[in-house]
Amino acid sequence: MAFDPRSLQVKKRYPIGVAKTPTGLAYDARTKRLFIGCRDEPKMVVMDAATGKVINSFPLKANGNNGTDEKAAERTRWQNQSDRA
């Protein structure tokens, strides 16, 4: 999703398509990539932040909350906080 930071109005929505229930998000400013962690079918989705195009997706461990894929995101790590009390 892209929004206007002043008005907070939503400008664009980008469907993930290959996964459901996004729960974690990381942004790599150098490559302008989004790394989206999803729950129902555990995956990390790599998306171009400018176009919304899904570049790739990778399976994650079904029973883990933390996702790290050094090949896909050498400098980016995300942690799903949604299951924490």
Image (cartoon, rainbow, N blue to C red):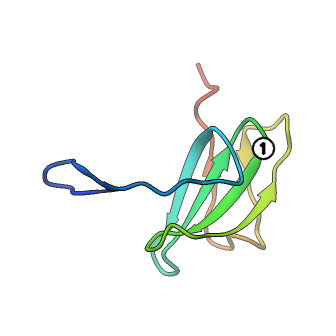
Tell me if residue 63 comes above or below residue 9 in the rendering. above
Tag 1 residue: 42
In the image shown, does 1 or 83 lie closer to the viewer?
1
Direction from residue 44 to residue 28 in the image, left or right: left
Kindly identify the residue that appears in the image at 64 percent across and 26 percent down.
Answer: 83
Direction from residue 36 to residue 66 in the image, left or right: right
Q: Secondary structure at mark 1?
A: loop
Direction from residue 78 to residue 7 in the image, left or right: left
Kindly identify the residue that appears in the image at 70 percent across and 48 percent down.
Answer: 19
For badge 1, the amino acid type reads Pro
Query: Residue 58: percent from the left, percent from the top?
Result: 79, 60
Local packing at callout 1 (Cα closer than 10 Å; few below 14, some 14-19, many 20+) is many
Direction from residue 11 to residue 78 in the image, left or right: right
Query: Residue 8: percent from the left, percent from the top?
Result: 21, 47
The picture quadrant where one finds residue 79 is top right
Kindly identify the residue that appears in the image at 54 percent across and 58 percent down.
Answer: 26
Query: Residue 35: percent from the left, percent from the top?
Result: 60, 60
